[in-house]
Image: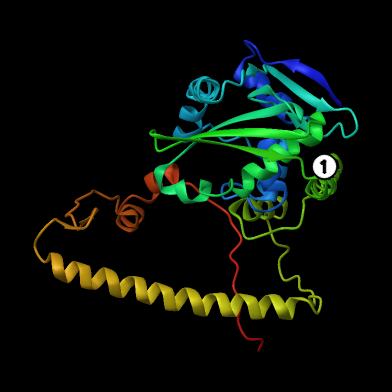
Amino acid sequence: MSAKILASTENMPYADWLEYRKRGIGGSDASAVCGISRYKSPVELWMEKTNQLPYQEAGEAAYWGTLLESLVRSEFTKRTGIEVIPANQILQSETYPFMLANLDGICEHPDFGTCVFEAKTASAYKAGEWEHTIPDEYQLQIQHYMAVTGFKAAYVAVLIGGNTFRWKLVERDDELISMLVQLEADFWNHVRENTPPPLDGSDASAKFLSERFPNSVPKSQITLPDTAADLLAQYDEACEQVEAFTERKQEAENLLKQMLGDNETGTSGNRVITWKSVSQERLDSKTLKAEHPALYKKYANRTSYRRFTIKAAV
């Protein structure tokens, strides 16, 4: 094995485990580094690694995935006869120290030797993603693990929808690993140098820019580089598409409301449409300011932000 044991995770507090995650790139980070994660952008991951954004608490799916890990492991052994040894360790690549691995387990294969074992759970709605292969983000995860450990194969077992069990053997892909190592090395350079990776359309990128440039210098003006023209064209095209899709959405909403009429809910197939009366009380700040200015001033909160607009030059 081309990895060393960085720490034991047995009885390790969750907060300590999160701190270890900041020391490098884990298997579950690989898809975000490569820009294909459905849940996290490269900028968001960079902000987590550089302590600018707290790690998100595990959601319901992750919670149940962790809880059912031992069940998936034991069911795999029951169906295949292959014993899985739990791996309660954080591993670190000796060749690439920024690469970490927290395996679900290891097992043996007659041809490939020691293999990675990865346990997964998936919604029934995602069953198609497991039909003939495994989802791309998990492919990157296990190839990352094989890069860290030097293993030649990995077993991935998944419980789908709580009632369908499958497993697959995935061989080491040295070409993919080579690409992955380069991408992760480039990303880790951004972490070490505290410089953001290329910004994208994520909320994390917007948050970074707001915090990096919180205030504008009054009456300051610059001439933007030539590449701004392409970005303006992209912006204009996106605005037109948003307007068109917003109108289509509103049309569908209006027609559904017409169908509901005075009724509060309606059903269509397995969908429930609700148009419910809601009453709420709101503070009339304008009247409060006019009639009790001192009281308004005492409790008013002043906020500051930068408004972004694009218009034709005069």
Q: Residue at x 71, y 29 (%)?
A: 21
Q: Residue at x 63, y 51 (%)?
A: 207
Q: Residues within 10 Å of mark 1 (few under 14, many from 20)?
A: many
Report the front residue among 15 and 107.
107
Residue that mark 1 sits on: 188
- Total labels: the figure holds 1
SS class of the residue under badge 1?
Answer: helix
In the picture provided, is 69 more to the left or to the right than 266? Answer: right
Q: State the residue lying farthest toward the bottom.
A: 314
Task: Tell me the residue at 55%/49% (across/down).
Answer: 132
Residue 149 location in percent, x, y? 80, 29
Q: Is residue 132 left or right of residue 260?
A: right
Image quadrant in which you'd find residue 17:
top right
For the N terminus, give its image quadrant: top right
Query: Which quadrant would residue 291 be assigned to in this image?
Result: bottom left
Q: Residue farthest to the front? A: 110
Location of residue 305 in the rendering, given as x and y in whole percent from the top left corner: 59, 57
Residue 134 seen in render: yes
Q: Would residue 192 appear left or right of 290 to someone viewing this image?
A: right
Residue 48 visible at all:
no
The vertical placement of 1 against 34, above or below, is: above
Depth check: 176 or 109 in front? 109
Task: Write the residue at 54% across / 51% down.
Answer: 303
Where residue 168 sits: x, y (%)? 59, 38
Point out residue 222 in the picture as x, y percentages from the top left corner. Answer: 79, 74
Q: Is residue 29 left or right of residue 194?
A: left
Q: Note whether 157 is above or below 246 in the view shown.
A: above
Given the image, on which type of amino acid does mark 1 rest? Trp
User: Residue 259: which quarter of the image?
Assistant: bottom left
Q: Quadrant of the C terminus?
A: bottom right
Instruction: Residue lying at the far left in this picture: please name it.
Output: 262
